[in-house]
Image (cartoon, rainbow, N blue to C red):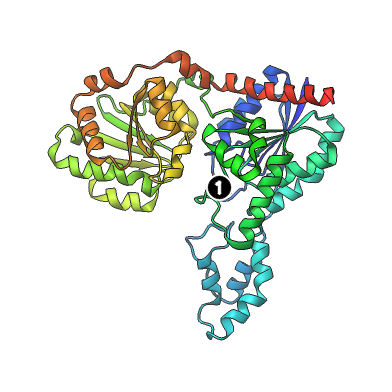
Amino acid sequence: MRKVLFIAYYFPPITGSGVFRSLKFAKYLPEFGWQPYVITATEDIQLHQFDPTLLEELPDEVQVWRVPAPHPQPYTALGQLLRRKPSVQSPPTQLSEETESSTVTSRPPLLKPLFRTLTWPLRLIENPPVDVQLYWALRIIPLAWRLIKQHQIDVIYTSSAPWAVLLTGLALKWLTGRPWIMDMRDPWVSDEYVCRDKGLRRKLDIRIERLALRAADRVVISSIGFVDELQTLAGPTVAAKVMEITNGYDEADFVIQTDEQITPVGERRWVHLGTTIWDGFVPLGDAIARLGPDSQALQEITFVFHGWCDPRVLEATAPNKEQFVFGPVIPHPQALALMQEAELLILLLGAQKHWSRFYTGKIFEYLRAGKPILGIGPRGVAAELIERCGVGCFVAAHETEKLIAVLRRIAGDYPAFLAEYYHPDWDMIAQYERQALTGKLAAVFNAMLKQKAAR
């Protein structure tokens, strides 16, 4: 069996965005003749949810090394020492402007510039270039090098974000000469929503991504919508090494039956699973508010949200708390059961144009769940996927009147909505099954070995 060094910072029992892609690849690669040697972080990653049941999916031959992720916080510690509390809204793994101001507040104005200058090294340590996982990405290089030598690893695979693992991939390729497959789940410097650094930090990030794109033997992306951005960044030749392997669904997950009945019998539930951001919710919230008083049928609907939710969404829906149900992240089998029991699956993308390039991970499980989808956001790859597979309706975020009409129709005449919009093409949907997608990744690994042998 051939061997792949599989570097994925987010890996079970952590759950959430990005985890399932790595989990399913690791699960099915042995079936295609590839044994993964996984390097990941320990379970104490901050700000993440956990689902230990996910570990049950890994075959016995998949070996996992867990390395702690250092997060030095000398600047925050200094603030605490000076009896200044950091902002509670700031993630502990990233230094924010609020944390900085809380540390220097109440000092004489003339001393603030001097204090910031003197503490600059501390702030740089706490918020290093690229991202706060930089220390972890550098820390795992010796372990990865030893595994490559001891186990005669054939190829190197990295999954990003975090983006610091690109430095790991670069270092290992230079040290060992092994082919490096760089999997970009999301865009980096071209996405201002993710990469907000300016000035010298942004220039450094651009240089690192450009260098990684040019050095990698193959670049795997989750959406073909990112290709133009990569070409702009690294040159036209990068397109020849780019391959789209989308996220997907695992057929094995849908044969698992849960004993618990999630949805009460007779209740009409419209379900959204995963992160709910404010600008993604606003179009739906506005349409419901305008339609609600005029639609008795809509009053029969219960809107169910599970996952992290922007506090502003909770505040906006508080007057109708009986109709809007919010819950935490739930185990994956329960989430799938909830999808299959729902009357409608809601997909909320952000309103900004850059969301047109994203599928989101859950959309593929939505496809397989056997229930219609209502997508809301900018038109792009997600809208095309829903319409191409015949599984629902997509409404642009700015089309408020159209969204009101669609909501009224679903609530008032559900069979008519199904007759018009729900005609699933199961052969097309099957292309997004995780086992098949892993076969595509294994084919990339095989091709890299052939190219290396031919040199």
Q: Which of 28 and 360 is in front in this view?
A: 360
Q: Is residue 408 left or right of residue 426?
A: left
Q: Residue 151 placed where, x, y %? A: 84, 30
Q: Which of 3 and 334 is in front in this view?
A: 3
Q: Residue 360 placed where, x, y %? A: 47, 35
Placement of 396 over or under 123, stated as above or below: above
Q: Which of the image's four quarters has the N terminus?
A: top right
Placement of 372 over or under 91, stated as above or below: above
Q: Which of the image's four quarters has the C terminus?
A: top right
Residue 426 in sight in this render: yes
Q: Is mark 1 on a helix, strand or loop?
A: loop
Q: In this view, does 34 lie to the left or right of 107?
A: right
Residue 144 in sight in this render: no
Residue occupying image coordinates x 61% and y 48%: 45
What residue did someone put label 1 on?
A: 190
- Dot 1, how many residues are within 10 Å of its Cα: few (below 14), some (14-19), or many (20+)? some
Q: Picture quarter containing residue 224? A: top right
Look at label 1 and name its amino acid.
Ser
Placement of 438 over or under 396, stated as above or below: above
Residue occupying image coordinates x 22% and y 39%: 401
Residue occupying image coordinates x 62% and y 79%: 115
Q: Is residue 163 left or right of residue 269?
A: right
- Number of dots carrying numbers: 1
Q: Which residue is most to the front?
A: 236
Q: Is residue 342 left or right of residue 401?
A: right
Q: Picture quarter containing residue 157? A: top right
Q: Residue 175 placed where, x, y %? A: 84, 41
Residue occupying image coordinates x 35% and y 42%: 326
Q: Residue 204 placed where, x, y %? A: 67, 56
Q: Which residue is most to the right?
A: 150
